[in-house]
Image (spheres, helix red, strand yellow):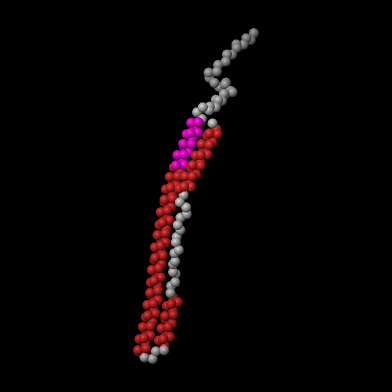
């Protein structure tokens, strides 16, 4: 009987292990490659200002000053466009990172639900194994232990012989 109980317990543990392994989903998808620009374009702004100052110093009349001013405006607009493009890329990257995080959270929730289901199945199998093992022990009884000290038993009355002192 002991061998049967051990075999049943081993089968229960094996089945529970297979269930846990079959419900695992693998690794989570981490954040994808997110690029983020931290450039403040100060070098581009300094270059545009330097070019304007240099060209402005070499002008001789109003017409040349107008051309130099237009060049300066064009360079500053180019810097502003580059800054805007970098901000749009940063916002796009942030959106990608948020979507990746959302997918990871959803996967974690699904995995948690699967693990909870596996735990319930394992607990059910454990209860079933205990019930089966308990059912196989019906014919096996241990003898009751006899109390060696019977003097405290109220039903144990021993006759005391009267003594005669003469």
Of 38 and 105, nearer the camera is 105
Residue 145 placement, left or right of 36: right
The prevailing secondary structure element of the residues shown in magenta is: helix
Residue 2 horizontal/vertical position (percent): 55, 32
Which residue: 41% across, 88% down? Answer: 57
Residue 157 horizontal/vertical position (percent): 55, 16
Residue 29: which quarter of the image?
bottom left
Per the rendered image, the range of residues in magenta is 121-136
Farthest residue toward the right? 166
Of 44 and 25, nearer the camera is 25
Residue 107 horizontal/vertical position (percent): 42, 53
Residue 89: which quarter of the image?
bottom left
Is residue 70 part of the magenta span, yes or no?
no
Residue 126 horizontal/vertical position (percent): 48, 38
Q: Quarter of the image for the C terminus: give it.
A: top right
79 lies above or below 130: below
Which residue: 47% across, 52% down? Answer: 26
Q: Quarter of the image for the N terminus: give it.
A: top right
86 lies above or below 100: below
Which residue: 51% across, 39% down? Answer: 11
Is residue 135 part of the magenta span, yes or no?
yes
Which residue: 52% across, 39% down? Answer: 10
6 lies above or below 47: above
């Amino acid at each position: 009987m002991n061998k049967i109980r051990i075999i049943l317990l081993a089968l229960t543990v094996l089945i529970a292990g297979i269930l846990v392994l079959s419900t695992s989903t693998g690794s989570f998808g981490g954040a994808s490659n997110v690029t983020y620009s931290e450039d403040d374009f100060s070098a581009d702004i300094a270059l545009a200002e330097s070019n304007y100052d240099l060209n402005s110093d070499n002008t001789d009349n109003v017409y040349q000053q107008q051309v130099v001013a237009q060049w300066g405006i064009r360079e500053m607009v180019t810097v502003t466009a580059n800054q805007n493009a970098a901000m749009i890329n940063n916002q796009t990257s942030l959106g990608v990172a948020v979507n990746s995080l959302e997918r990871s959270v959803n996967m974690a929730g699904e995995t948690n639900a699967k693990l909870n289901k596996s735990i319930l199945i394992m607990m059910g199998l454990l209860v079933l194994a205990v019930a089966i093992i308990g059912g196989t022990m019906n014919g096996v009884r241990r003898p009751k232990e006899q109390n060696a000290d019977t003097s405290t038993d109220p039903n144990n009355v021993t006759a005391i012989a009267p003594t005669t002192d003469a």
